[in-house]
Image (cartoon, rainbow, N blue to C red):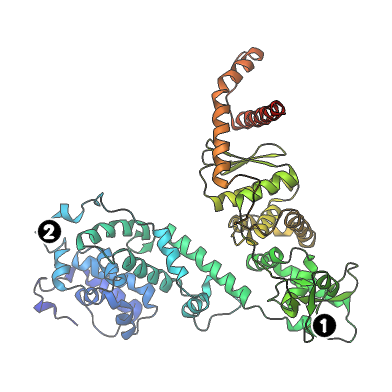
Amino acid sequence: MDNQNNSQFFPDNYDRNTLGLKKKLVRKYNVKDDFSALDISKNAYVIYDWLSERKVENPNASSVYFFDYAAQTLGIPYQLLTESYFTQTQLTEEELFKHSTKFNTKLNEMNRTKTPSSQIEVPNFNEKIEEYFSQKQISELLKQLSIPGTNLSKSNLKRYNLNWLLSDIIKSVWKNITVHCSSEEQETLKLYFRKYFYKDKQEYSKQFLSLTKDKLTSLIQKEEVQKLEPDSELIKLLSQEKIDTDSLNKYIKQKQSSLRSLSYYKQFLVHLSHAFYLSPQNIFLLTGQYPTYSVVKTPLEWKYCEQEINQDAQPIFLFGDDKKSVIPFFDFKDTSGEMILSEATFNTRELIHDLKKTYQIDVNFSEYLGNVTHQIMGDHTLMVSASLNESVSFQEIIVGSTGILYKNLSEIEKASVNFCILKSFGIDYQALDEIYKTTDQKKVNIEESLNKIQACVDQFQTQISTEYVINKVETEFESFEEEIRISKEMEGNALSNMQTVKQEKAENKNQDSPTNITDIGSIIDLEFTKENNSTDEEEDDKK
């Protein structure tokens, strides 16, 4: 421990005004060894180890109170200590004195509170956090975060050390953004850094906490799906000489009851997104027998696909069409032939084309939706914001088109359909979580609801291509960018004629009605019609 009487910069007994706070720390954490504010500050960069050596419980959580005591005692900014920790830089007594407003009377207040230089660009911290996770192996990270001795039935954040993760992200991001910065630039970046990551000296910001928790929850769910193993109870039922279908139905009922939990419900929908061609009952049987399935078919169906079933293939028993008896299915991995499975990839322009061709749904892009990302304008028209990138536009088109097609479904059923369809393209539909939490599960007939969801997903995926190939040799329609350009141009033409439309309305009314998005949509439809008519006339002239 530092000898306070021999400090070069701080006076003797500099901590006399905070002795009460120190005594509280000693009692609360049962600290046996003596310590000082200078001792804490100089070891801020290794505070976890420093506290562990003194047998302080929960060093991550308790560090904020020790830092607070040191900051108050020395009159230094609390962030100076946290920065020492996540930058792994040891503070000297001279640096501590330099930042002390309590003991350094010559400290220039203006320099200490100067605003960031406009030459330094604000880092995209959301992107930096995503980079952090992208560089990690999911299983290894969760193993590192796992808290020993916790109840494994808790499929949530309580099984993992969130504080350690938050701290590690901060250290990693800081190192990443300052790797080539001068000391002056680092001072500017610190201000941006504090504003994003910290609510105050003892709490992380809401945006940082929310983003990290959502990301960790997503990783946990993915890992849990990957770790699924065959259900021993189901295997025992299917190993009987004569399979009892009543027992299977009872097993399915039990599994359905588990879907009252959000994590299990989403896990089931993930399977439904891949095996949408099966009934919900068969999905329970499939995942209970072979959770790492790819595509399953009957022997006859594989024959039509010109795939031969391997001799050592293990059958998967599912209900037949009559739902009263079970028949064998086989997974693609247990077959041989020329067939190749490819993952679905999204292509917005082909989706627009297929929706028009199959369901007569017109998708148009508008610059006048404000904060609205999409708007349904009748049974066959969907307006999407032109300011969105292609992947977000794809999601909004899916959500909007299912809103048109499946308007009789409940909100949770619509959200579940969207989740399944988007998941098949590798897109997470995060709106499901909030809708699920606000749904009264007691009023939901889970079996009936699942059948509706599966029927809608099967219909959509069967009639709309599930594999959009981005690089096609020939195409009959415009690129995504061209679709937006044409929509903007037509919307511009529509708006330029708006005054004429208002005048016509004024002849029938005493006052003009305000222009709304429905008016714009109607005019755009007229523009499409006029364009098609002019095209037909030009073709007639050519003839």
**At 79% across and 60% down in the image, what residue appears?**
451
496 with respect to 328 (left or right): left
The amino acid at mark 1 is Leu
Q: Which one is nearer the viewer's eye here, 124 or 529?
A: 529
The amino acid at mark 2 is Leu
Label 2: how many residues lie within 10 Å, few (<14), some (14-19) or many (20+)? some
Say whether residue 289 is visible: no
State how far apart marks 1 and 2 are (Cα): 78 Å
Q: Quadrant of residue 306?
A: bottom right
Q: Which residue is mark 1?
A: 237
Disc 2, SS? loop
Q: Position of residue 102 (x, y in %)?
A: 15, 62
Q: Position of residue 274 (x, y in %)?
A: 70, 66
197 with respect to 341 (left or right): left
Q: Which one is nearer the viewer's eye here, 534 or 299?
A: 534
Q: Quadrant of residue 81?
A: bottom left
**Circles 1 and 2 in contact, beta carbons < 8 Å:** no
- Quarter holding the C terminus is top right
Say whether residue 454 is visible: yes
Q: Which one is nearer the viewer's eye here, 537 or 143?
A: 537
399 with respect to 216 (left or right): right
Disc 1, SS? helix
Above or below: residue 357 compared with residue 24: above
Indicate which disc, 1 or 2, sits on the residue closer to the N terminus: 2
**At 72% across and 27% down in the image, what residue appears?**
540
Q: Which residue is mark 2?
A: 107
Question: Mark 1 or 2, which is nearer the eye?
Answer: 1
- Quarter holding the N terminus is bottom left
**At 47% across and 68% down in the image, what residue appears?**
134
Q: Position of residue 456 (x, y in %)?
A: 76, 55
Q: Quadrant of residue 328?
A: bottom right
